[in-house]
C-alpha cells in the first residue's frame, strides 16, 4: 500500500490513494481551513468502513437480510500530547428481523475479534466497546 500527500493549504494535504483524491485538513480552531476531514476523524471513518464491510459480508454469507445499518464511532482525546483516542464506543444501528439477533451479534463479534484490521490496530492503544442495536433496542 502506498499513499501520497501534498501540502495544498495552511495545514491541508491533498491525498492520493489508488484512483481517489481527497483533502485532509485541520479545523479552523486549530489553525487549519477546514477544507476536509481531520486525520483522526478519517481514522474513525476507516474503522467504521472496515467493520461495516465485514459485518455486511458476514451477514450476507449467513443469509441474513438487513434493511439498514448505520455505525457511529464516539471517543474523547487524551489531554497530553500526542493526544490519542481514549476508548472508542462503536454503535451498530441495524434494522432487520428480530429472529436474526444472534447472527447479528456473531457477525459483529467476528469482525471485531477476527477480521477488521483497523480495529486490531486501534485496539492496541484504545479499547473499542461495541454496542449493537436491532430495531432501536440494544441486544
Image (spheres, helix red, strand yellow):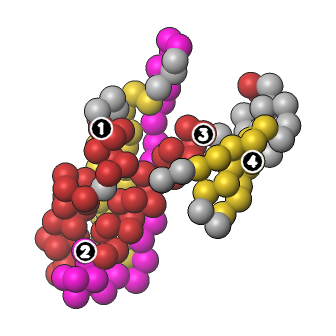
Q: Residue at x 68, y 49 (%)?
A: 15
Q: Position of residue 22 (x, y in %)?
A: 71, 55
Q: Is residue 66 above or below residue 50?
A: below
Query: Which quadrant is home to the C terminus?
Result: bottom left
Callouts 2 and 4 close, C-beta under 8 Å: no
Marked residue nearer the N-terminal end (2 or 4) = 4
Callouts 1 and 3 close, C-beta under 8 Å: no
Q: Residue at x 25, y 53 (%)?
A: 112
Q: Which residue is mark 2?
A: 58
Q: Position of residue 123 (x, y in %)?
A: 30, 38
Q: Helix, strand, or loop for circle 2? A: helix
Viewer-nearest residue: 41 or 132: 41
**Location of residue 40 by image quarter:** top right
Q: Helix, strand, or loop for circle 1? A: helix
Q: Which residue is mark 1?
A: 123
Report the Cα–Cα distance between label 2 and label 3.
Answer: 29 Å
Marked residue nearer the N-terminal end (1 or 2) = 2
Total numbered labels placed on residues in the image: 4
Per the rendered image, the range of residues in magenta is: 58-81
Q: Residue at x 38, y 68 (%)?
A: 53
Q: Which residue is mark 4?
A: 14
Looking at the rendered image, the disc whose residue lies closer to the viewer, 2 or 4, is 4
Amino acid at each position: 500500500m502506498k499513499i501520497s500527500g501534498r501540502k495544498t493549504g495552511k495545514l491541508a494535504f491533498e491525498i492520493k490513494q489508488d484512483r481517489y483524491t481527497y483533502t485532509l485538513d485541520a479545523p479552523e480552531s486549530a489553525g487549519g481551513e477546514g477544507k476536509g476531514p481531520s486525520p483522526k476523524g478519517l481514522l474513525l471513518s476507516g474503522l467504521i468502513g472496515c467493520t461495516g464491510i465485514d459485518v455486511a459480508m458476514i451477514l450476507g454469507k449467513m443469509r441474513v437480510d438487513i434493511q439498514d445499518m448505520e455505525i457511529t464511532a464516539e471517543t474523547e482525546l487524551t489531554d497530553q500530547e500526542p493526544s490519542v483516542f481514549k476508548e472508542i464506543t462503536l454503535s451498530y444501528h441495524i434494522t432487520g428481523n428480530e429472529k436474526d439477533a444472534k447472527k447479528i451479534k456473531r457477525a459483529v463479534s467476528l469482525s471485531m475479534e477476527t477480521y477488521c484490521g483497523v480495529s486490531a490496530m486501534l485496539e492496541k492503544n484504545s479499547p473499542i466497546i461495541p454496542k449493537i442495536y436491532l430495531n432501536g433496542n440494544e441486544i
